[in-house]
Amino acid sequence: MTDVLHVCAFEDNYIWLIRGKSPDRVAIVDPGDADPVLAALEKQRLKPAAILCTHHHGDHVGGVEDILKHYTVPVYGPARERIPAVTQRLKEGDHVDLPELGLGFDVLDVPGHTAGHIAYYGAGMLLCGDTMFSAGCGRLFEGTAEQMLTSLSKFSALPEATRMYCGHEYTEANLRFALTVEPDNADSRAHRDWAHAQRARNLPTLPSTIGLERRINPFLRAGQASVRRAAEKWTGRTLGPEVEVFAEVRRWKDGFR
């Protein structure tokens, strides 16, 4: 079983350290801040084998160059975004092989949050950055609703047991919105209670799984009649295809408090 460690950064970011067959080597995922990563590496006597970046936002790549002052490792990232430290630029169909860890990842293009966002899928894991969160999805800063819906559909098609590691601890807030959209969703209510208990003990609510997200995430459920009814009630009009429902739910979430 692959071991994944979490490093907390900023207010609610997670930086993931993925350990495979070598107990002292890890891949670092989206290191927005070098200091907590370097501290975790030293404390746990780990050395990086690679850095994996999903998109160009500073809270995901801001620590890369400082880490490279201490370690010489390859840096993987999206081909369509400008991240100066990236040494291996990736697009959908590419494969990342990390022999020191005994792990490999397929690359998915998942625009929406940013124009060139990518995700990594392999070893039963999805490293999805800010494209999807537990019970939520990223804001449409550079992409369109149609792009984001297509990206999320790629995730939804993955095996149910796939463990999803995203970039932020947003689960409780997302579930408040999810239960506003689908107040009768028993899975969302149960997960809300579990997430609250986790956070009360200062424990992460991640990873989630694709199977769970299909049941609780309104952005994966835009094709469900219950989500359509809620979106139409919120907008006060009849909506067209699924992408229109998705776009309105995303707009609804943007202003939700």
Image (cartoon, helix red, strand yellow):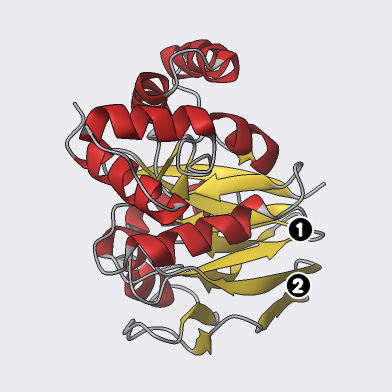
Task: Look at the numbered disc 2 and give the secondary structure of its residue.
Answer: loop
Specify the amino acid type for callout 2: Glu
User: What residue lies at 39% left-to-right and 48% top-to-bottom?
Assistant: 246
Q: 246 above or below 177? A: below
Can you see residue 215?
yes
Q: If the image is split into quadrants, where does the C terminus sit?
A: top left
- The residue singled out by tag 2 in the image is 100
Work out whether residue 179 or residue 239 is closer to the camera in this orientation and state it. Answer: 239
Q: How far apart are marks 2 and 1 (CA)?
A: 8 Å
Q: Quadrant of residue 172?
A: top left
- The residue singled out by tag 1 in the image is 20
In the rendered view, does 196 fall on the left or right side of 140?
right
Work out whether residue 240 or residue 145 is closer to the camera in this orientation and state it. Answer: 240
Mark drawn on residue 181: none
Q: 123 above or below 72? A: above
* Circle 2 crowding by C-alpha within 10 Å: few under 14, some 14–19, many from 20: some
Q: Position of residue 119 (x, y in %)?
A: 54, 66
Task: Look at the numbered disc 1 and give the secondary structure of its residue.
Answer: loop
Q: In which quarter of the image is residue 190?
A: top right
Can you see residue 205?
no
Specify the amino acid type for callout 1: Gly
* Circle 1 crowding by C-alpha within 10 Å: few under 14, some 14–19, many from 20: many
Q: Position of residue 54 (x, y in %)?
A: 46, 67
Work out whether residue 78 or residue 5 is closer to the camera in this orientation and state it. Answer: 78
Earlier-in-chain disc, 2 versus 1: 1
Q: Position of residue 79 (x, y in %)?
A: 45, 87
| Figure label count | 2
User: What residue lies at 78% left-to-right and 60% top-to-bottom?
Assistant: 22
Do the CB atoms of the residues marked 2 and 1 lie less than 8 Å apart?
Answer: yes
Q: In which quarter of the image is residue 154?
A: bottom right
In the rendered view, does 25 fall on the left or right side of 99?
left
